[in-house]
Amino acid sequence: MVPKCGASLSPGTLCLAAALNGLLSFGFLAAAIGTDYWYLIHVDGAERNGSSARDGEELSSHSGLWRLCEGQNACMPLIDPFGAESWLVPASLQHLIYMHRAFMILLPLSLILIIFGWICGIVGSLAQISWLLLFTGCYFLLGALLTLSGTSTYICYSKAAFIETVRMFDQQRFDRVHITFGWSLALAWLSFGTEGLAGILLLLAAQGFRLKLDAHSADI
């Protein structure tokens, strides 16, 4: 389906569409990394314990990759997975630190790849260099893979951290706790999709420029 659609479009149009998707991917991922709505914890007010709905709101929190925001209080930074305090974490929880380090590397790295990939794509499209567009398309697909890996690692990390928290404390304390993923994570998924689409469009554009060059050589 994609190759058919790509065959009906000129290489220049495909490059323009890839550039727009690259910009969208960068915007989505930058917004996702910079916001604090990846992981949402909502606590219901419990009448049986005499706590009100307002108490539940104060206990609720939302967090991002860098910090945690609780209720109406100011946000506080999360533990630095590369800092000295990470080595003080018990050995049984070190796997959480490893996962934390993984997505803290993968997602910003993907953001950097988008910038360099976008520049290479612009140069390749203006100069109509098929091999550069082919390289850039694979480059974008690699970036999409990094985004997918980082996002998936974050989801696994969040679930594992919650399981460890429940295991360490009384299960009844979490009866009123509801865990969801927020719109920041959705932006990361959108970035993955647009980044991968940009890579595919660049590969199609590279093929189009190569066929155009072959046809021109045959005419000569």
Image (cartoon, helix red, strand yellow):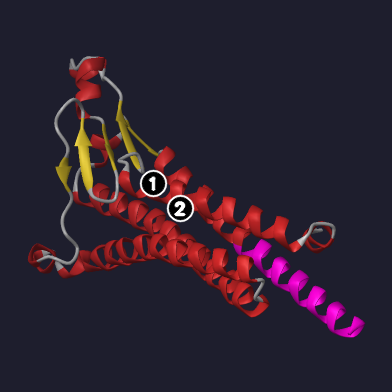
> Marks 1 and 2, Cα distance to the nearest angstrom?
10 Å
Q: Nearer the viewer, residue 131 or 36?
A: 131
Asked if 145 appears above or below 134 in the picture, the reply is: above
**Number of marks:** 2
> Range of the magenta residues?
199-220
Answer left or right for 173 relative to 20: left
Q: Which mark is residue 32?
A: 1
Q: Position of residue 105 (x, y in %)?
A: 32, 66
Q: The C terminus lies in which quarter of the figure?
A: bottom right
Asked if 16 appears above or below 37 in the picture, the reply is: below
Q: State the predominant SS element of the stretch in magenta.
A: helix
* Amino acid type, residue under disc 1 in the picture: Ala
For residue 218: magenta? yes
Asked if 59 appears above or below 208 in the picture, the reply is: above
Give the labeled residue for mark 2.
26
Q: The N terminus lies in which quarter of the figure?
A: bottom right
* Amino acid type, residue under disc 2 in the picture: Phe
Answer left or right for 59 relative to 213: left
For residue 105: magenta? no
Q: Please name the residue shown 74% across and 63% down the image.
A: 11
- Tag nearer the camera, 1 or 2: 2
